[in-house]
Amino acid sequence: MRITIVGAGAIGGYLGARLSAAGEQVSFIARGRNLEAIRARGFRLILEDGSELAAPEARAFERMDEAGPQDVVILAVKAHQVADLLPGLPALLAPHTSVVTMINGVPWWYFHQLAGPYEGRQLQSVDPGGRIAAAIAPERVIGGIVYPAAELVEPGLVRVVEGNRFTIGEPDGSRSERAEALSQALMKAGFKAPVARDIRAELWVKLWGNLCFNPISALTQATLEDITRFGPTRALAAAAMAEAQAVAEALGVRFRITLEQRLAGAEAVGAHKTSMLQDVEHGRALELEALVGAVAELGRIVGRPTPTVDALYALASLLARTLAAQNGRLALQPA
């Protein structure tokens, strides 16, 4: 299977390296030192047990037209980076090519093939003007949920922190041949890769925590353990999660775990820095719209109030604006 990974960071590298080592024809779209490292040595992983896995056959290209048409394109970038990929993306797409979204948050295709009154609706928060939906035919999309944690420790080298599960699913809930084939390739590479009958329900379980823990951590510099063990922030997170649950249920989603179980799961992770806090620390743009803004937009669409989510979004948006104004540098000065 010809697979291109767009986004050779921690998750993209983890996926691509294992798929390549398992015999798939994997190409990375990369830049700078990461591109040079992959071209020189392939991609390498440090696994959870400390052992190394090398994928010397993995290829890397700076431009998508160098890779050519693929069977599968995996988007392993932040949601706000997808629009920037659109000019080059057609070069990867043959008539049969699937586009797999391994992206956190609410995806631009959320309402595609969602039976009911909102089918086909566009989300302005994640796809202003419908640019992405117009450029990537919705019929190409396979949804993906990322559960592992990993970090890019140096160009071409990823350390796996924990986890090996990537759930995938068709937007219409079918068990298509292409989804089954991708699942088999992922499992051959050593991943758990179930094909979900309801990919949106899977999406909401992860989003349920992301929508509150990410902005709270970014604003307070606190870890998951800090947030869930400090009464006021635990209550704040619970309030935002309750609002989000009401929105999701209005869209037909049914949660298989309770709010308290989700909070307990986050607490059990320990002193983990959320991705948004790490973005603040490294001066990167915040993944705000897909994780928080889209939840507020969905609330407006279904007529469910989200005052706590709105407040977190307002505060985190100002933080993002401050970071941008200060060129990504935000430092707390000692007294």
Image (spheres, rainbow, N blue to C red):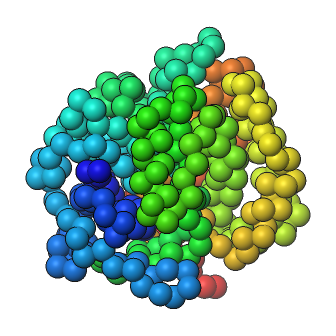
The image shows residue 293, relative to residue 33, as above or below, that is above
Q: Residue at x 37, y 49 (%)?
A: 75
Q: Nearer the viewer, residue 50 or 62?
A: 50
Is 1 positioned to the left or the right of 150 in the image? left
Query: Would residue 239 be found to the left or right of residue 73 on screen?
Result: right
Residue at 15% of width from left, 52% of height from top? Answer: 67
Location of the C terminus by quadrant is bottom right
Residue 259 spot, x, y in % from top left: 84, 48
Q: Is residue 290 above or below residue 136?
A: below
218 versus 241 height, above or below: below
Tell me which residue sits at (34%, 38%) in the image. Answer: 98
Q: Position of residue 277 (x, y in %)?
A: 57, 66
Up/down of 199 relative to 130, above or below: below
Tell me what residue is drawn at x 26 percent, y 51 percent: 2
| Numbered circles on residues, count | 0
Q: With 8 as the anchor, is 201 left or right in this view?
A: right
Residue 141: x, y in percent? Answer: 41, 34
Could one spot residue 292 in this view of the protein? no
For residue 267, what is the image quadrant?
Answer: bottom right
